[in-house]
Amino acid sequence: MIATIPGVQRFVAESRRTADLFASSSIISELAGAMVGAVTEPAELVLPGRPDMGAPNRVVALASRGEGRALAQAMAGAVRGKWAQIRAGSKVEEETPGFPAVQWVVVPPCEGGYEAQFERAQELLRERKRVRDFVFPPAVQERVCTLTGRWPASRDAQIKGVVRRGEHLSAVGRIKRGVRGEFPSTWSIALAPYKADIIEVAETDEAIWTALDNLRESISSLADDALPRLRKGLENDLLTWFDGLEGSWCVPESWDPRVIRRENDLPEQPDRDTCAYGRQSASDLREAAQAAGTRFTPFLAVLAQDADRLGESLSDPTRANGPMREWHGRISEALGRVGPRQREAIESGLGRVVYSGGDDLLALVPAATATMIARQSYDAFQEEMAKELPDATISTALVFFHASWPLQSAVAAAQELLEQAKNRSRPGLAIAVQYRGGERARWVTPWLAADRTHILHHLEELVRAMTAAQGLSKRLAIGLEADADELATLTPAWLRMELRRRAVRHGMPETAGTALSELCAPDGGRTAVPVDALLVARFLASGDLA
């Protein structure tokens, strides 16, 4: 039998801030864990192979003859029971008809054994997904939930610390907000490399040290004036305190009294002199850090990855490495190794994992380390799956966005972009750059270049060359865009030679020209001119992304 919790990506994407995003992932993880935990002897887990191998939102299990329906119902009941516990913990009394949903199929023993059962279960599950359960009772709807956009908002009064001024949340939205924890903001993730570089040089740089000391004094005054929670960690030494400081306080604009009041739901604006001093301290820190060679980069990225047609591959007995039942167990073990490797890559790059199931991944990562993390996550999947399913691939989407850009829009854009990557090529790679004024570039390409190396290796080589030769790429990009139609008529070999020639003519080293030429990719019946790739590289190489 196979049981699944549908709509996970949509549920996670319904997040206006990082706390919503990580809370959504935590809730789904708990629900999936309950579903896995309901599979007890004599029933047997297949995917995942063991309860400690993670909690995916799809579970494959074997039950004794005639016990499949009871097991599936127990798994669905465990999910509903866990949701009731989460709802009670959030102190939400309202029911949430229609959520969470659990879809399951059971296939009895048949000719062909496990292989035939699994294939039939996959077919039935695809059909089951087309059927919707309409269990919503009549409800008076004055407003739609501003977080989820699909349930009626509750009539309850504003709840301090849960519902912000101007928000109207449904029961599901309030349950998300009821999940407590320490969640980094978009500013904290975007500025993580900036803060790490400051900590590394602060003790030997008097200007940085003075600015940090002044910033802590400003935080202390604000804690006394309006935000007592900021007192946490003030007793630590300067660098330890700064390491734990919320990233937005390093941004001069965040010290606007109106912004502080709105973001913290205060009854009135904090003291203007305190805010002015804090703004100046953050500005001084930024200038001192820039003088020391540290970049202030207010951009981060949503990283989304998803395996290509993995379910289809697992249903194909011709790909099985040995008996299918045992092969599925080894595939599960391989996926169980992928997740920790991806998490290590993300956290070593100062990013944060939203969820990582081995075959799918969502994370928030700093702009400076995004392509490196994407490469390492891709490699983790390919290397762990190489023995059991050599042709398995995983596609990737990266959406770079300003820390003040709506998070919900960025996550939704990443999910849409991932579909474009898969439609373009498998494995596919898609990168978009969104400024506060709108999208600047969208590049969709195969993961592997013509020389069969990672396409990101060539992008990173181009970025390094452009970083060393600031300003030399703008005219090149304009020229390539203007001549794109004519250049596309060239053969692949001539196009690459022309790109190398143009890059060198615009002052770039030969290595940059070679890297640019390797970013060409087949596009239908012609070779695409990598204008969008160049725009992405210009963004990553920019010295000031503010």
Image (cartoon, rainbow, N blue to C red):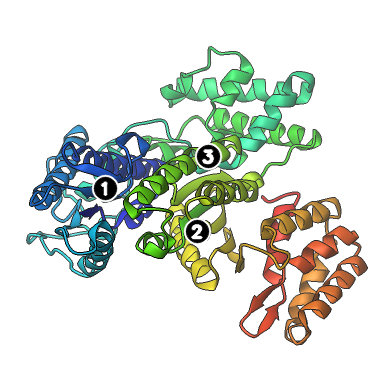
Q: In the rendered structure, which amino acid carries the disc numbered 1?
A: Gly
Kindly identify the residue that appears in the image at 73 percent across and 49 percent down.
544
Task: Using the rendered view, name the quadrant where residue 120 is placed.
Answer: bottom left
Task: Using the rendered view, name the quadrant where residue 286 is placed.
Answer: top right
Nearer-the-camera pick, 23 or 48: 48
Reading the image, the residue beneath label 2 is 392
Reading the image, the residue beneath label 1 is 173
Q: Is residue 254 visible?
A: no
Residue 475 on image: x %, y %: 82, 70
Disc 1 and disc 2: Cα gap in Å? 37 Å
Left or right: 30 as drawn, with respect to 539: left
Up-down relation of residue 52 to residue 211 (above or below): below
Disc 3 and disc 2: Cα gap in Å? 17 Å
Nearer-the-camera pick, 415 or 76: 76
Q: Residues within 10 Å of mark 1 (few under 14, many from 20)?
A: many
Q: Residues within 10 Å of mark 2 (few under 14, many from 20)?
A: some
Which corner quadrant holds the N terminus? bottom left
Residue 209 on image: x %, y %: 72, 21
Mark with earlier residue (1, 2): 1
Q: In the rendered structure, which amino acid carries the disc numbered 3?
A: Arg
